[in-house]
Image (tube, rainbow, N blue to C red):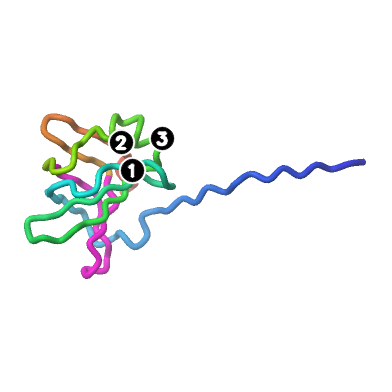
Amino acid sequence: MVLVAIAFPSVAHHGWSGNTAGEIELSGTVVTGVSLAGAHGTMQIEDADGHVWDITLAPGPRTHRSGLKEDVIPLGAEVTVFGERNEDQDVFEAKVRRVVWGDEVFDVCPPPNP
């Protein structure tokens, strides 16, 4: 008998751990556009105090299905994001469920279970 092993690449899923400091609504200017290249979509925004925030979106395919694709929101655009802030207050990072740009609303993730 011959057994054939097929290797499937594992897909890392990063949950909301580390981003449990509570709900956040954050407005800022897009300084690094949406990227769907990694396990999750990402972007960076700069807030009014000059802090650059790392924004983690849903996995790429889900973010894409929400309509938030690479190059949809231009650099310099003002956006508001809604999600969970990193529990380390010195880390400017949030995992977000919703991105609002003008009249466009991108629901990239369903809200977490209560």
Q: In this view, does 19 lie to the left or right of 73?
A: right
Mark in front: 3 vs 2: 2
Measure the alpha-carbon separation of dots 3 and 2: 12 Å
The part of the chain drawn in magenta is: 79-96
Look at mark 1 in the image and give the residue it sits on.
Answer: 35
Outermost right residue? 1
Q: Which of 110 and 57 is in front in this view?
A: 57
Q: Distance between the residues labelled 2 and 1?
A: 6 Å
Residue ID at (17%, 30%): 104
Q: Does the magenta stretch include residue 95?
A: yes
Q: Are marks 2 and 1 in contact (CB under 8 Å)?
A: yes
Residue depicted at 42% across the width and 47% down the height: 38
Secondary structure found at label 1: strand
- Quarter in which the N terminus is drawn: top right
- Badge 2 or badge 1: first in the primary sequence: 1
> Which disc, if any, is residue 61?
3
Which label's residue is closer to the chain start, 1 or 3?
Answer: 1
Q: In which quarter of the view is residue 111 placed?
A: top left
Tell me the number on the disc at residue 70. 2
Is residue 39 placed above or below 90 in the rendered structure?
A: above
Q: Position of residue 96 (x, y in %)?
A: 27, 47
**Earlier-in-chain disc, 3 versus 2:** 3
In the displayed structure, 54 sits above or below 72; it is below
Q: Marks 2 and 3: in contact by CB < 8 Å?
A: no
The alpha-carbon separation of the residues under discs 1 and 3 comes to: 11 Å
Task: Pick out the residue farthest to the left.
Answer: 48
The amino acid sitting under disc 1 is Ser
Q: In the image, what residue type sits under mark 3? A: Pro
Q: What numbered label is drawn on residue 51?
A: none
